[in-house]
Amino acid sequence: MSNDIPTLKFDPFEDDKSSESKKAGEITNKEEQVQQPVLDESTLTLEEKKIVNDFVNQIDLSKSNLVLQYGVGAQKKIADFSESALDNVKTKDLGEIGDMLSGVVSELKAFDAEEEKGLFSFLKKSSNKVSALKAKYDKTETNIDKITNALESHQIQLLKDIAMMDKMYDLNVTYFKELSMYIMAGKKKLEKVRNEELPVLKEKATKSNLPEDIQKVNDFVATCNRFEKKIHDLELTRMVSIQMAPQIRLIQSNNSMMVEKIQSTIVNTIPLWKSQMVIALGVEHSGQAAKAHKEVTDMTN
């Protein structure tokens, strides 16, 4: 059996964590299955169909515990998965990253605001203004570097989160299919017993008219109804899995967008500001050199 095929079982507490971890990394490109609330048998592989059909033959509705615990293991996986996804969202504060990005802009604006006539206004002032400008530049650069280091750390974490979301998405696909196979097997079993076993019991009760035979019919009908409700409960759980898929992608998209903003700030905004400072200081130095040359020329003439 391949690792990406869910295993159906009656014991919901059986340890199956090792097989789950393998399946999480191997199932890809199945988004369309998550988006469809109904998984018909045509979407299953031959091996998966065999698993479902074999499991149908193992379902014994005469066992009350089986009806009560049917698919509970798969439901618990979805519940735990939803909890882990929620914890992941709660521990991430994209607002803090946004504040850091705003901090970069604020630092640069504050620097420019100190020069009343813009970045090149000091060219018209005395040479001691160059030293003052360098001091302001060094101070601003120090603050910018601190913010940049913090942003780079957040960027690394966000990239890890994006990769983790891919695994979570694949794991969600696995759980969705597993639940769908339980539902499919349950519906096939329910249809079979209602069409084959129930008519036999009714016919026997009609012929014998014995209280115990009539009670068997009533009990069997009640069991079928409980099992049908259980299948419906599994379908509600599967809806959680369906809704989880776009939510995971939304979180992943937000993280990707924030990574792009961080990257743009680090590789575009800050280097551009520094290059403007280099040009401004270079122009001033050239001006001072030209002035010195003129003074020397005037003295020699």
Image (cartoon, rainbow, N blue to C red):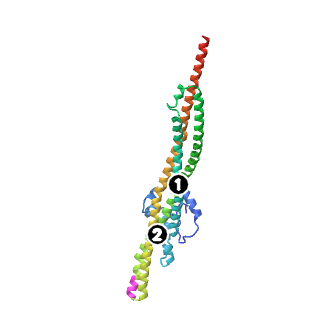
- Residue 2 is marked as none
Mark 1: amino acid: Met
Dot placed on the residue nearer the N-terminal end, 2 or 1? 1
Asked whether residue 59 appears in the rendered view, the answer is: no
For the record, the magenta segment spans 202-208
Q: Is residue 42 magenta?
A: no
Q: Position of residue 130 (x, y in %)?
A: 58, 29
Which residue is at the front of the view, 174 or 79?
79
Q: Position of residue 3 (x, y in %)?
A: 55, 61
Res 140 quadrant in image:
top right
Label 1 CA crowd tier, 10 Å (few <14, some 14–19, many 20+): some
Location of mark 2 (residue)? 185
Write down the quadrant of residue 225 in the picture. Answer: bottom left
Determine if residue 147 is in view.
yes
In this view of the protein, which residue sits in the foreground, 37 or 147? 147
Q: Image point 56% across, 32% down: which residue?
A: 277
Secondary-structure class at tag 2: helix
Count the numbered circles shown.
Answer: 2
Amino acid type for the residue under numbered disc 2: Ala
Residue at left 41%, top 77%?
A: 196
Residue annotated with mark 1: 165
Q: CA distance from mark 2 to mark 1?
A: 30 Å
Which residue lies at the image location 60% right of the left edge and 39% below the top edge?
Answer: 142
**Residue 72, percent from left and from top:** 51, 70
Considering the image in quadrants, where does the C terminus appear? top right
Q: Secondary structure at mark 1?
A: helix
